């Protein structure tokens, strides 16, 4: 009896954040073109590397295997696409809903809580990022850049990367004072994109390669790359742990900030 | 301040029924600023209860505490016998909130605003559809159902807000200045709708700057000033207690009003001097005016009107409500 009521209430608790995902789906039902547009940039990157760069660079050695350069770069681009999609959704979009349209103020007068809002918005960003990653993966496969069937694991990994960066993005957004503050976002993501072993192996950094560990994106790139090669080793769990911890921390900070600033 | 005239009646009513909302020593401060400085009130089920006061009186701060989106600094607040600090979500499920500034979802259409709002209250899609249709009819906006929110007029947006606040079939409706900024016709439409909601037995809690609104809609109200309640009662009892039956408004022209305060005081019970006119509180306005004229005191213009809550407010705070 009490178990039934408890599970019913847990079920309701999980469902509440979903309402925000439902709202986003409602908004984008009319604007699905905007969703598609998010695919172009990573696809163009992929194409340009496939066509030009790959021939120039030749093969790269990863985990003791030699693979073609485009097969090396593609997982990095996939991870970066997941990051960029999540960041885009969780920064400017959320700032607009927070400050300009007062959406969260309205939501807080309903049974939704600050945590529901944080989880729901991050959930939508993850969903969107996962759609991109899947489309990207299909393109990779079509271009013959896939090494192993394990590559399907890149989809949940992309979702995890999306979770981490959407959480961090939303948490950061709660500290933004005006639109001008968003200038800092590319200042943070561009270096991550360039230096997270995306375009060349971490060994290129020599003695300084440990610094790359500080980049959350690096951990995502390593996971996608492992999925593509089908190489599974215990060390990967550390990468997962980093992403999970950062994501949970970001979500918590975002929820706390919403509570502090809007429920005043 | 309890009202002596109505005191005995309320005592009986209160002891028979529980209040839907009760506040005791309710305080809200923001840093050093005290927005609500310790207020007590009880709202009974099915009544329309008003908070009347000028800018900065603490009306919105009070509404936000009642709406469980602003924790009280100190004091006790209960809705439906529950404490917002612990049961905010359960309480909010039974409230409808129309905030001072419309917070409609600009990315959605009018009907979508209602539909998604229903979902926040865990109402099924099917049920949401039928309620949304019904409510848009209620606020006479059915033909704008598929319009975006942005291009609607102020009054239309307000009506969407009200329809949306009713989607969960709330027991208590909280309306923060529901008609501010609307033209007289739009206000009358809204009053009519609110009156209908009251007749359905819903409890209305509203704030307003407008005396006529309070007189029309409220069974009982409190007058707030500087974060405190300065008077409480029904509109009629407040007028009876703090004003006379009629008010004679006299204008003598710029700068000359002050010269006639003493004359005016002789023909009425009390005189208020405003920058542009004198208000003479009297039981018989025409009589007082005739007496003045007999004494060869002839104002540029004179007007006799029934006294209103505006006069109550002036008496209690020495200031006008709407400047
Ligand atoms: N979030 C806040 N932070 C700091 N001060 C606040 C906050 N909200 C309200 N105040 C202050 O509290 C006081 C009461 O404000 P409140 O909004 O409750 O008044 P009000 O009666 O609703 O006024 P109005 O008629 O203008 O809407 C004001 O001095 C206001 O500046
Ligand atoms: Mg206000």
Image (cartoon, coloured by chain):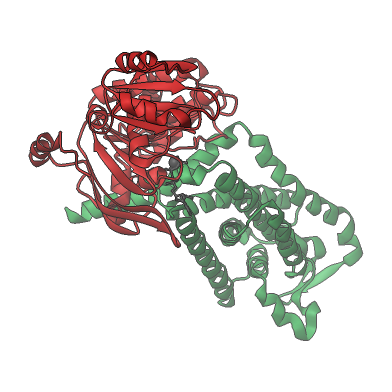
Chain colours: A green, B red
Q: x%, y% of residue A59?
A: 83, 68
> Is residue B288 visible to us here?
yes
Outermost residue on the bottom side: it is A207
Q: In which quadrant is the C terminus of chain A drawn?
A: bottom left
Q: Residue at x 11, y 36 (%)?
A: B13
Q: Is residue B124 above or below residue A138?
A: above
Q: Residue at x 55, y 48 (%)?
A: A98
- In this rendered view, identify the residue nearer to me: B156 or A239: B156
- In this rendered view, identify the residue nearer to me: B137 or B213: B213
Q: x%, y% of residue B129?
A: 40, 25
- In this rendered view, identify the residue nearer to me: A11 or B239: B239
Q: Residue at x 45, y 37 (%)?
A: B100
Outermost residue on the right side: it is A56
Taking the image as shown, residue B280 lies to the left or right of residue A102, namely left
Q: x%, y% of residue A72?
A: 76, 65
Q: How many marks?
A: 0
Q: x%, y% of residue B114?
A: 44, 30
> Is residue B127 visible to us here?
no
Q: Is residue A67 above or below residue A234?
A: above
- In this rendered view, identify the residue nearer to me: A6 or A138: A6
């Amino acid at each position: 009896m009490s178990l039934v009521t408890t599970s019913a209430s847990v079920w309701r608790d999980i469902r509440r954040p979903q309402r925000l995902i439902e709202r986003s789906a409602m908004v984008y039902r009319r604007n699905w073109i905007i969703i598609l547009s998010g695919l172009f940039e990573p696809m163009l990157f992929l194409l340009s590397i496939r066509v030009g760069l790959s021939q120039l660079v030749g093969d790269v050695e990863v985990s003791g295997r030699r693979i073609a350069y485009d097969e090396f770069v593609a997982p990095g681009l996939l991870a970066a696409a997941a990051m960029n999609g999540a960041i885009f959704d969780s920064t400017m979009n959320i700032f607009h809903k927070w400050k300009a349209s007062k959406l969260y103020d309205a939501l807080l007068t309903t049974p939704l809580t600050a945590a529901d809002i944080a989880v729901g918005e991050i959930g939508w960003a993850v969903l969107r990022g996962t759609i991109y990653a899947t489309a990207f993966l299909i393109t990779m496969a079509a271009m013959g850049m896939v090494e192993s069937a394990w590559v399907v694991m890149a989809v949940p990994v992309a979702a995890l990367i999306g979770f981490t960066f959407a959480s961090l993005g939303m948490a950061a957004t709660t500290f933004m004072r005006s639109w001008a503050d968003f200038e800092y976002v590319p200042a943070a993501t561009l270096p991550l994109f360039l230096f997270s072993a995306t375009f060349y192996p971490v060994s290129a950094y020599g003695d300084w390669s440990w610094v790359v560990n500080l980049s959350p994106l690096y951990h995502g790139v390593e996971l996608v790359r492992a999925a593509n090669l089908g190489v599974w080793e215990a060390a990967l769990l550390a990468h997962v742990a980093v992403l999970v911890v950062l994501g949970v921390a970001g979500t918590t900070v975002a929820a706390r900030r919403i509570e502090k600033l809007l429920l005043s | 301040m309890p009202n002596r005239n109505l005191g005995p009646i309320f005592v009986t009513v209160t002891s028979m029924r529980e209040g839907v909302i009760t506040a005791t020593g309710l305080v809200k401060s923001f840093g050093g600023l005290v927005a609500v400085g310790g207020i007590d009130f009880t709202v009974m089920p099915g009544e329309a209860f008003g908070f009347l006061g000028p800018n900065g009186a603490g009306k919105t701060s009070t509404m936000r505490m009642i709406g469980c989106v602003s924790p009280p600094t100190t004091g006790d607040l209960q809705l439906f016998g529950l404490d917002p600090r612990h049961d905010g979500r359960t309480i909010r499920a039974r409230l409808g909130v129309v905030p001072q500034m419309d917070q409609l979802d600009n990315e959605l259409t009018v009907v979508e605003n209602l539909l998604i709002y229903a979902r926040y209250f865990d109402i099924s899609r099917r049920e949401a559809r039928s309620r949304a249709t019904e409510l848009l009819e209620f606020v006479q906006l059915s033909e704008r159902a598929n319009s975006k929110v942005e291009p609607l007029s102020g009054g239309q947006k307000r009506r969407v807000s009200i329809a949306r606040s009713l989607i969960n079939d709330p027991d208590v409706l909280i309306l923060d200045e529901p008609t501010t900024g609307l033209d007289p016709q739009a206000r009358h439409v809204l009053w009519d709708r609110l009156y209908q909601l009251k007749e359905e037995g819903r409890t209305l809690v509203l704030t307003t700057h407008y005396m006529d609104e309070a007189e029309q809609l409220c069974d009982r109200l409190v007058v707030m000033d500087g974060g405190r309640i300065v008077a409480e009662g029904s509109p009629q009892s407040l007028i009876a207690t703090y004003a006379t039956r009629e008010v004679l408004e006299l204008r003598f022209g710029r700068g000359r009003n002050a010269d006639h305060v003493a004359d005016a005081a002789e023909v009425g019970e009390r005189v208020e001097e405003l920058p542009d006119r004198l208000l003479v509180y009297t039981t018989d306005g025409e009589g007082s005016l005739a007496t003045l004229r007999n004494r060869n005191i002839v104002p540029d213009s004179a007007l006799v009107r029934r006294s209103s809550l505006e006069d109550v407010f002036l008496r209690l705070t020495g200031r006008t409500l709407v400047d």
